[in-house]
Amino acid sequence: MYLLSQLSNREKNIWVALILDITVSLYFFPKVFAMEGGIIANGPELFSLIVKITIFMIVIHILSHIFFVTGKDEKMDERDHQFDAKAHRVAYIALVVGISLLVGQLVLREVAAEYLSFDYEIFNMSQVIIYLMLFLTLSSIVKNSLNLFFYCRGY
């Protein structure tokens, strides 16, 4: 508890968001990638999974706010805005790289099929959507991790 008293409310919120992102990712993505037949074939199962995760996240956010956030709300100063800007910039780059890799793979498949008479497994639409969700989640994890790093470093 001593460590928690050393952290600002903003740092506590970032920690909770980071831990939730990682926990939900480790629970959600393996289950979704293991589904056969795509989103349409597994609609009810996927819907149930999303509802469970949403309820879990709401409950954890409420509990974390009750137990960890103390005192008045802190206004953001120049340093906080600078940390956020740096973290958002790197997270944006990570997101663009992930999406570029996905688009590159899709284009490469078309080029290979057209010019090299070589056909290989392509992502179906469900897999593309899941990979986009994965890249968005990884971007959020990068952003929160960098924010914590900047706060711990202090400059």
Image: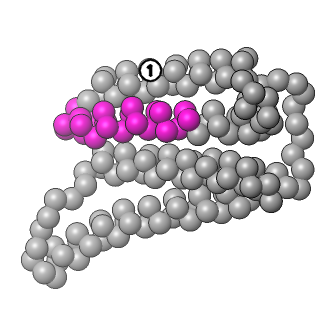
Question: Residue, x 58% and y 40% (percent of image)?
Answer: 18
Specify whether residue 85 is in view.
Answer: yes
Question: Residue, x 67% and y 57% (percent of image)?
Answer: 87
Q: Is residue 20 left or right of residue 42?
A: right
Placement of 141 over or under 56, stated as above or below: below
Question: What is the three-letter code of the residue carrying label 1?
Answer: Lys
Placement of 23 over or under 111, stated as above or below: above
Question: Residue, x 30% and y 67% (percent of image)?
Answer: 105
Query: Circle 1 — which element?
Result: helix
Find the magenta span and give its range: 19-41
Q: Name the residue under label 1.
A: 52
- The scheme the figure's colours follow is one colour
Placement of 78 over or under 41, stated as above or below: below
Q: How many marks?
A: 1
Q: In this view, does 79 lie to the left or right of 130?
A: right
Q: Nearer the viewer, residue 120 or 137?
A: 137
Specify whether residue 147 is in view.
Answer: no
Q: In this view, does 120 lie to the left or right of 98?
A: left
Placement of 83 over or under 107, stated as above or below: above
Q: In which quarter of the image is the C terminus?
A: bottom right
Q: Nearer the viewer, residue 1 or 70?
A: 1
Q: Name the image quarter holding residue 44.
A: top left
**Where residue 45 sits in the image (x, y, percent)?**
30, 24
**Where residue 141 sits in the image (x, y, percent)?**
55, 47
Q: Is the magenta stretch mostly helix, strand or loop?
A: helix
Q: Which of 40 and 16 is in front in this view?
A: 16
Does the stretch in magenta take in 36? yes
Q: Quadrant of the N terminus?
A: top right
Question: Residue, x 23% and y 77% (percent of image)?
Answer: 111
